[in-house]
Image (cartoon, rainbow, N blue to C red):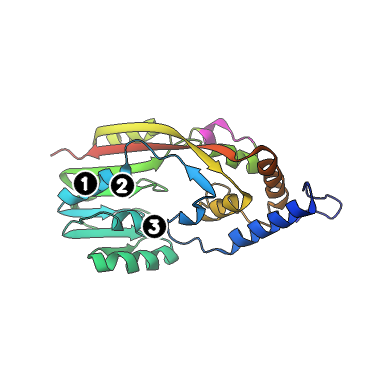
């Protein structure tokens, strides 16, 4: 909390009241799962041109045994119109495990609680398709191990310096090595080193806008690695300054980076 001698930069009492109401609302809403519908009308994110969910569903419809790594609340997997006869999802966060189990079990998919650390709790050559949307870490050697010969890994991932306009508003300028982390060329090299053959690699920078400070609070509470240790109390001056900026200048603009990678196990 700021000291009383450092007033927050509100333009009026009405602005302060709006700030407090928006922040209180966003701080109270649950953030389990990977559903961002609470942000409808409050933030927008341009979608990648390749349509990951649709392309993933197409591959699932042709697979015999599939693994969805770091499934979150299972929302993306559950949206596929047809799942393979054997479908398994992993997740580490307990609230998401419960949510994914409730969503996916009726569809015939099994959810496995896993700490997202190697080794994966599956035998060699167990799956002909492994998918993952926005994994925190990609364990390439383990993915290669659990794929059948001829099997495919298909993933949409967060790219370098994603939404860093927002990150740096709160944390200040980040060093070059932090800004280039998650470079798609590093993924290419890691996949190749694990013995996989690259099939596709594409990257895009996408327009993202936040229309009010509540959307920012919700986003930072949900995507916890953006501003590690984020709390409203710990960043109250920055939140107030950003609220004033949005009111004065309009939506806060950032850029999300995404890349698509598909790799095949020889055989």
Residue 169: x %, y % from top left: 64, 40
| Residue occupying the point 82% across, 54% down | 3
Dot 3: few (<14), some (14–19), or many (≥20) neighbours within 10 Å?
Answer: many
Magenta-span inclusion, residue 85: no
Q: Which callout, 2 or 3, points to the residue nearer the camera?
A: 2
Q: Which mark is residue 72?
A: 3
Dot 1: few (<14), some (14–19), or many (≥20) neighbours within 10 Å?
Answer: some
Q: Secondary structure at mark 2?
A: helix
Dot 2: few (<14), some (14–19), or many (≥20) neighbours within 10 Å?
Answer: some
Q: Which residue position holds label 1?
A: 58
Say whether residue 176 is left or right of residue 195.
right
Q: Quadrant of the N terminus?
A: bottom right
For the question of whether residue 147 can be seen, the reply is yes
Q: Residue furthest left?
A: 267
Kindly report the distance in space between the C-alpha atoms of the residues bearing marks 1 and 3: 20 Å
Q: Which residue position holds label 2?
A: 53
Kindly report the distance in space between the C-alpha atoms of the residues bearing marks 2 and 3: 14 Å
Which quadrant of the figure has residue 116? Answer: bottom left
Q: Are marks 1 and 3 in contact (CB under 8 Å)?
A: no
Q: Secondary structure at mark 3?
A: loop
Compared to residue 95, the image places residue 16 above or below, namely above
| Residue occupying the point 67% across, 37% down | 249
Q: Secondary structure at mark 1?
A: helix
Of callouts 1 and 3, the N-terminal one:
1
Residue 165: x %, y % from top left: 58, 37
Q: Are marks 2 and 3 in contact (CB under 8 Å)?
A: no
């Amino acid at each position: 909390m700021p000291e009383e001698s450092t007033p927050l930069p509100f333009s009026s009492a009405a602005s302060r009241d709006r700030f407090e109401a928006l922040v209180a609302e966003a701080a109270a809403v649950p953030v389990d799962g990977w559903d961002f519908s609470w942000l409808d009308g409050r933030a927008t994110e341009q979608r990648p041109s390749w349509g990951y969910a649709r392309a993933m569903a197409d591959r699932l419809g042709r697979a015999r045994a599939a693994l969805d790594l770091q499934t979150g609340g299972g929302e993306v997997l559950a949206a596929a119109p047809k799942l393979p006869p054997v479908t398994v999802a992993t997740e580490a966060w307990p609230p998401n495990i419960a949510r994914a189990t409730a969503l996916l079990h009726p569809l015939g998919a099994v959810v496995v609680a896993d700490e997202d650390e190697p080794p994966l709790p599956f035998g060699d050559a167990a799956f002909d398709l492994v998918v993952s949307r926005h994994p925190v870490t990609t364990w390439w050697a383990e993915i290669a191990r659990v794929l059948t010969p001829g099997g495919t890994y298909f993933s949409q991932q967060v790219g370098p310096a994603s939404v860093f306009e927002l990150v740096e508003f709160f944390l200040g300028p980040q060093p070059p090595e932090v800004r280039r982390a998650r470079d798609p060329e590093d993924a290419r090299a890691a996949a190749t080193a694990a013995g996989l053959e690259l099939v596709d690699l594409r990257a895009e920078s996408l327009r993202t806008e936040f229309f009010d400070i509540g959307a920012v609070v919700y986003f930072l509470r949900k995507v916890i690695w953006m501003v590690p240790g984020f709390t409203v109390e710990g960043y109250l001056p920055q939140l107030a300054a950003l609220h004033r900026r949005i009111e004065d200048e309009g939506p806060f603009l950032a850029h999300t980076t995404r890349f698509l990678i598909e790799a095949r196990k020889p055989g």
